[in-house]
Amino acid sequence: MTLKNQPYRPPLDYGLYEARREHDACGVGAVVNISGQRSHQILEYGREVIENLHHRGAAGGDDVTGDGAGILFQLDGNFFRPAAESAGASLPKDHPYGVGMIFLPRDKALREACGRHLAEAARQYGLSLLGWRDVPSDPSCLGALALRAEPCIRQVFIDGGGLEEEILDRKLYMVRHRAVKCAQQALGESAEDFYICSLSCRTVLYKGMFMAHQLFRYYPDLCDERMISALAVVHQRYSTNTFPNWRLAQPFRLIAHNGEINTLSGNALRMRARENRLAHENFGENVADLIPILQPGMSDSACFDAALELLLRGGRSLPHALMMMIPEAFGSAYHISTDKRAFYEYHSAI
């Protein structure tokens, strides 16, 4: 059987094999300038970290296809304003705007259909698309397995309409969910390659099915001196709870995570059970756009990220949401403050 030009798909459950029995263990790193000063050097430090995490990632049978690598960092007009202009889009100078990093089908008709769903979702939430940019890439560094599954990668620019960052990011969160849901309903399995890596006015995410050393080579943007940030989160994947996949490379939108959540099935089922009661003033009558919170085929880390993002967009601070997601041990045998014990007891009920 020849595999030439066939898209990569993970194997289905067969016989005694069940994909849900897999586990993962990855390499994670972060670099931060605590004064908040942005520079390209932060990305270079991030590059050094991830390349030193090479031993924490896995390779395919060809030894050149990685399980996934990526970097999350701050959005900055120093790079994106001229990049957008070169693609024919003009970014606002007096208010925030959104930038999306998007994996799209290689088929032109499907790609355009997914783009229309994204534009319509933005209009639904009172936002407008300013334009698209083809993300420069160098696929010559990839192995055959990664090349077979390589998506079309584009960036989208969205006018924030004068909204403050917190509100705009919440709307972009809703736009992302609605666009993917509508595309899936209209296109079925053909929309499988439509994946929004990040859509935010604060951060942007470059990732893919790479070995650690391929990330900066594949994306020339990352080597551009105009690309600056005060933080960088990097991840090198060892995918043993789900098969290698461009969309499951990390970081995700909020976290980079080592995986191995032993209580994954129970947590996922409880989240599904909560969905019919999900309500919040931040989401209003559009709450149905968010369901399902956990998309089929997500890894344990992707599920964690989705649940954490829901809590964050629902108005909680990130430290608050993380304490809900990862409560420390508490009970009669553990000595913690009365207030903290009360916090965990309260949140264990919800």
Image (cartoon, rainbow, N blue to C red):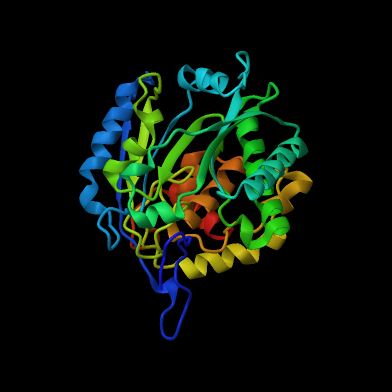
Residue 242: x and y in percent read 41, 64
Query: Which quadrant does the N terminus fall into?
Result: bottom left
- Observer-nearest of 222 and 319: 222
| Residue under the point 24% across and 35% down | 48
Q: Is residue 326 visible?
A: no
Q: Is residue 341 above or below residue 71?
A: below
Drawn side of residue 176 relative to residue 268, left or right: right
Residue 218: x and y in percent read 36, 38
Drawn side of residue 254 relative to residue 133, left or right: left
Q: Is residue 73 visible?
A: yes
Query: Which quadrant does the C terminus fall into?
Result: bottom right
Residue 303: x and y in percent read 50, 57
| Residue under the point 33% across and 63% down | 333
Drawn side of residue 97 relative to residue 212, left or right: right
Looking at the rendered structure, the number of numbered marks drawn on it comes to 0
- Observer-nearest of 139 and 197: 139
Q: Is residue 29 above or below residue 132?
A: below
Quadrant location of residue 185?
A: bottom right
Task: Single out the residue that lies furthest toward the top.
Answer: 94
Q: Is residue 84 above or below residue 198?
A: above
| Residue under the point 52% across and 59% down | 348
Task: Single out the residue that lies furthest toward the bottom.
Answer: 15
| Residue under the point 20% across and 52% down | 55
Quadrant location of residue 331?
A: bottom left
- Observer-nearest of 14 and 127: 14
Residue 345: x and y in percent read 50, 57
